Image (cartoon, coloured by chain):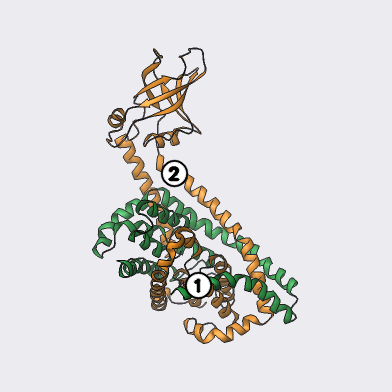
Amino acid sequence: MLNYIWGGLIVLSLVFALTSDLTDFVQDTYRNGTPLPITITFDEEYNADARRQYVDVQLLGNDLATHYGDSSITGNTWPGILLQTSAGRELRFAAEASLVEPLQTICQETGQDDCRGALQGTPTSAEWQTTIIFGPVRWVKMNAIASAALDFARTAVTLALGLIGGLGLWMGLLKIAEASGMLHALVRFTQPLIRPLFPKVPKDHPALGMIVLNLSANMLGMGNAATPLGIKAMQELQTLNETEDTATDPMVMLLTMNTASVQILPPVTLVAIMGLQINQLFFSILITTALSLIVGITAVKLLGRLKRYREVTP
Amino acid sequence: MNIVQVFLDYASALVLPAILVGFPLYGMIRKVRVYEVFVDGAKEGFHVAVMIIPYLIAILFAIGMFRASGAMDFLTDLLRPVVGLIGIPAEVIPMGIVRPLTGSGSVGIVLDMINQFGEDSIFVKMVATMFGSTETTFYVIAVYFGAVNIRKTRHAVPAGLIADVFAMIAAVYVVLFLFG
């Protein structure tokens, strides 16, 4: 199923991006190459020899609305710089100017790190009425999905490397717990509770202890500790796996219990966002997660009986 | 309720230090060579982190592309009439779609909703409950299964998603029941 979902996400992204870009192309959303009326006011008198001069740029709401065919756009005045280059006069919006859509998008797509457009004509007075042409905007979404793919691939590595510290700490502590016989005691003490859910794990197996620790950390909202403990539990379960790359029943159960986990205390992130308001949500989260845990466990047990998901032993 | 909560609050603050000190201390009492054993275990941390990288890249890049393509807005529009039928407000749909895919994205949604409707609003209670009741399922799958090189996930994805969908719907009803 993950194969289909994964492939589906990628193919769907392409379909949606392509549709959106073709719509832009057909409707000429960004009016590529069409001049837009603009009024430029010089801070100091216009100087034909100056390479750059500070100006104020006024775009009227009416002009914008007619130009882009969207009556909701409002006009404004932004600070900018008039540049005289060999190619002609160009207007550069000041970096701090927060532009309205679709100008914002146009600037993001055309400028490397600044937002420019070519001006037509020659300044005649301190208040110069002219037109501006922005660079052509094409393939907005196609560029977006391509750069998102690269960004997220990098994020994946950052995330994984960020786990090293926590993983090392917990795995070290757990090794001590194992060597000191603590884990064994925990297993003996909790297995009557937990083993009915993991019938294929042999009695007194250390995996049960790791599972208990992982689930407890989850319940207490300690996400940072829960991940290393869960990974350790998976490693213990993998020692019982007869295949190399196929999930076993206990693994699927553990994973589902983690994604649907009971939260006695809400996760730390949510507490950080909600502040004191979290007190009210204490019960709603507890009830919801308790219900979804039951549904999750039932789903695992029932789906596991389906022919296509049945365990294959080599 | 208050006493329970205060107790849990203390418990969660004390559990971590208790483990950090308790495990090595108990090990020392049981005559374990704690330092040597710890280093032995910690060695694995690096190995595991590197093991999960390919799995995380695979999952995250697909999700990133999907988010950037604008497909989520389309899905929200598609689901609006369907979930309306079972009494779920359209405002909370984005959370239902984003939550299993990305953690940071769903935090953004909660913050957006707080800005838009205020902390006390029932919609914020709903999305916050949804957030607290589910996990970023695909990330968890990538990390947990990636760490032991499991590629054939069998019924883990459907079971996780069933639990997710159920939790999303249940969150709305539970909040309506408690605060509605």
Q: Which residue corresponds to the image point at 47% horizontal and 19% vertical from the top-left?
A: A87
Checking the image for residue A266, the label placed there is none
Chain that is coloured orange in the picture: A
Q: Chain of mark 2?
A: A
Q: Foreground: A224 or B51?
A: A224
Left/right of residue A124 with respect to residue B56 in the rendered view: left
Q: What residue type is disc 1 on? A: Val
Q: Which residue corresponds to the image point at 69% horizontal and 80% vertical from the top-left?
A: A180
* Residue A121 picture location, percent across and down: 39, 15
Q: Which residue is mark 1?
A: B6
Q: Which residue is mark 2?
A: A144
Q: Residues within 10 Å of mark 2 (few under 14, many from 20)?
A: some
Left/right of residue A243 with respect to residue B93 in the rendered view: right
Q: Foreground: A269 or A204?
A: A269
* Residue A172 picture location, percent across and down: 67, 70
Q: What residue type is disc 2 on? A: Ala
Quadrant occupied by the N terminus of chain B: bottom left
Which quadrant of the figure has residue B134? bottom left
Chain that is coloured green in the picture: B
Q: Which residue corresponds to the image point at 54% horizontal and 76% vertical from the top-left?
A: A211
In terms of secondary structure, where does tag 1 sit?
helix
* Residue A152 picture location, percent across and down: 51, 51
